[in-house]
Image (tube, rainbow, N blue to C red):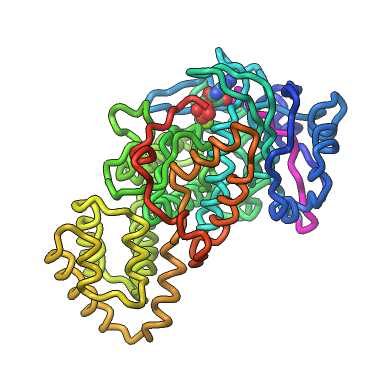
Amino acid sequence: MHFDHTYAQKLSDMVSQVRISPLLEPKLALYNEQLAEEIELKNEFSQADTLFAALFTPDGCLNQQGVAQKYGGHQFGGWNPDLGDGRGVLLAEAVTEKQQSWDLHLKGAGKTPYSRFGDGRAVLRSTIREYLASEALHNLGIPTSRALCLISSKEIVYREQPETGAMLIRACQSHIRFGHFEYFYQSNQLDKLDKLFNYTFQQHYPSFLDHENPHYSLLEQIVLSTADLIAKWQAFGFCHGVMNTDNMSIHGITFDFGPYAFLDTFDPDYICNHSDHNGRYAFDQQPGVALWNLNALAHAFTPYLSIDQIKQALTQYETRLQSQYAELMGQKFGFKRVSNHDMQLVNQWLALVAQDKRDYTQSFRLLCDENLNANKLADHFIDRSKAQNWYQAYLARLAEESIPKNERLMTMKEANPKFILRNYLAQNAINAAETGDFGECERLLKVLSNPFDEQPDFEHYAQTPPDWGQSMEISCSS
Ligand code: AMP
Ligand code: MG
């Protein structure tokens, strides 16, 4: 592995050099050894003193060439040109032996030229939430930025109330957002837009340079990977909460975690963001919002593509989303091939789970129970007869494909997690961490590293929330 700084060097007029402001009494609270291994950081930074020397001393190798990136974004539908890394620093790109490049990005690094009125800090609560969620999603097979380590501290940071400051190093292919392209297009800096496109091709999609129309290939790739991502969010019941275009990655990964939630009770209209008064980012709005965001991004492609070409790329979104979603749902129900007719059965099931306000994850997992019968299923619901009728239709559908039951249940269990990161579980881990005990974070991470396994010793982590943990209001402040 070696460190590179291609974004900072090749796009030097689109970034600002930033030095990290150290935190008071930093502690290496969580360290993701598996990811460190993957990035070939090995044990270099697993010791607090070497990591802190690299980050916090003026000539430290992770501090010397750090930059804040400039971008803009559509926030709740309105264009905001004044965004950028206001508290984040792109430290370096770690390039592995196999030439895989990972951005290392520090969140909570202190003020940057894009901080506006913010303090440049991140609180322990939100860094833990990001750490847990990115690892939970990754283990479910949902593309996401990853968490490399979390640094806690004694620094006081003021939000609605005083909290402790923390830092998180996250890693992903790149931090290029829809909002990067939008910014240079909207501000009419077309030479910079061109440089950003060229950089993106060279660094991330070199094969597109051989295509007849590289810009078309890129837009199409972003459209398709976004559709794939949203299909997974919808299938696993993940609600992002702040799908502003500055929080959308061009790599189709889950990115910039805020007041997200994994659904407990299935409520299609669920709004996890306390500040989202109109439900713009409600669970069932996510597919439409992602397309809206792709449309916003597509404006930046207009200097290169005709309107027809843009339409052609964007129209692929819906078909791809539907086919990916159908495939995932097919796996969840144990169908090998999924037809339109099957989707009726899927939708009837979802309507039943929503109508009776059942837990999304537990309801699906029940379908993998080897002793399931009509009565047992009816016991799970309030509307017993509806549940029984649905089950008869389901059995008839299963009979159309002769998959041995054991085999079917095994594959279904791999599509229906037993363990998800429920908000109350994250809150328990945060409460303990705020007293300096990261044991609960570690335990939760361990459970969530095998979300599809039975793990009988951790049965209680599969439970629905206690009263205090139901419909928790997650503050947007972080
Ligand atoms: P977020 O809600 O984290 O996606 O951030 C939206 C914008 O606000 C980005 O430009 C962030 O860098 C900036 N921002 C958020 N929190 C802070 C903070 N505490 N200090 C400075 N900038 C911030
Ligand atoms: Mg953001």
Looking at the picture, does residue 209 appear above or below residue 29? Answer: below
Query: Is residue 86 within the magenta segment?
Result: yes
Residue 85 screen position, x and y as percent: 61, 26
On the rendering, which quadrant does ligand 1 occupy? top right
Q: Quadrant of residue 399?
A: bottom left
Please tell me whether the stretch drawn in magenta is mainly helix, strand or loop.
strand
Image: 430 above or below 392: above
Asked whether, in this view, residue 353 is left or right of residue 80, the answer is left
Is 62 left, or right, of 89 in this rendering? right
**Visible residue check, residue 183:** no
Q: Where is residue 339 drawn, in percent x and y?
A: 27, 71
Instruction: Name the residue: 84% across, 36% down.
Output: 49
What residue lies at 63% left-to-right and 45% top-to-bottom? 439
Q: Work out whether 287 lies above or below 5.
A: below
Residue 213 in magenta stretch = no
Q: Nearer the viewer, residue 372 or 409?
A: 372
- The residue segment tinted magenta is 84-98
Residue in the picture at 70% in, 40% down: 104
Residue 432: image location, x then y, percent: 57, 37
- Which residue is at the front of the view, 135 or 463? 463
Residue 164 image-quadrant placement: top right
Q: Position of residue 93 (x, y in %)?
A: 74, 42
How many callouts does the rendering have? 0
Could you tell me which residue is drawn at 37 percent across and 64 percent down?
A: 365
Q: 129 above or below 161?
A: below
Q: Nearer the viewer, residue 227 or 303?
A: 227
Q: Is residue 21 visible?
A: yes
- Can you name the residue that lies furthest to the top here? 117
Q: Name the residue at the left extreme.
A: 385
In the displayed structure, does residue 276 sit left or right of residue 166?
left
